[in-house]
């Protein structure tokens, strides 16, 4: 099985995880809470996260919608 790379750094992330543990911990608590919600907006929030990472926004400054 191929190892998954974190989109925010060169470290590996676990299957089913958005980021590696280090990058996940660097996100604000409210952002982590919102990304953990499993509802109809979950995929939209994940796209917001990836868009901000692609725009090189610092992890502690990333916010996603509710």
Image (cartoon, grey):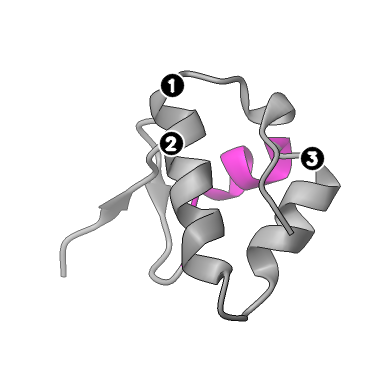
Relative vertical location of residue 55 with respect to residue 37 in this rendering, above or below = above
Q: Position of residue 32 (x, y in %)?
A: 72, 54
Picture quadrant of residue 45:
bottom right
* Relative side of 21 to 44, left or right: right
Question: Do callouts 1 and 3 mark residues in contact (Cβ within 8 Å)?
Answer: no
Question: What's drawn in magenta, residue-wise?
Answer: 17-26
- The Cα atoms of the two marked residues, 2 and 1, are separated by 6 Å
Residues 11 and 24: in front is 24
Which of the two discs, 2 and 3, labels the residue nearer the N terminus?
3
Q: Is residue 18 visible?
A: no
What element does badge 3 sit on? Answer: loop
Residue positioned 43% across, 42% down in the render: 50
Residues 34 and 20: in front is 34
* Residue assigned mark 3: 28
* Residue assigned mark 1: 55
Badge number at residue 51 = 2
- Most frequent secondary structure within the magenta stretch: helix
Picture quadrant of residue 28:
top right
Question: Quick check: is 47 in the magenta stretch?
Answer: no
Which of the two discs, 1 and 3, labels the residue nearer the N terminus?
3
* Relative side of 8 to 49, left or right: left
Query: Local crowd at mark 2 within 10 Å, few (<14), some, or many (≥20)?
Result: few
Question: Do callouts 2 and 3 mark residues in contact (Cβ within 8 Å)?
Answer: no
């Amino acid at each position: 099985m191929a190892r998954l790379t974190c989109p925010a750094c060169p470290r590996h992330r676990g299957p089913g995880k958005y980021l590696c543990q280090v990058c996940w911990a660097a996100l604000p608590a409210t952002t982590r809470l919102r990304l953990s919600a499993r509802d109809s907006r979950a995929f939209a929030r994940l796209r917001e996260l990836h868009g901000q990472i692609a725009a090189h926004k610092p992890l502690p400054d990333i916010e996603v919608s509710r």
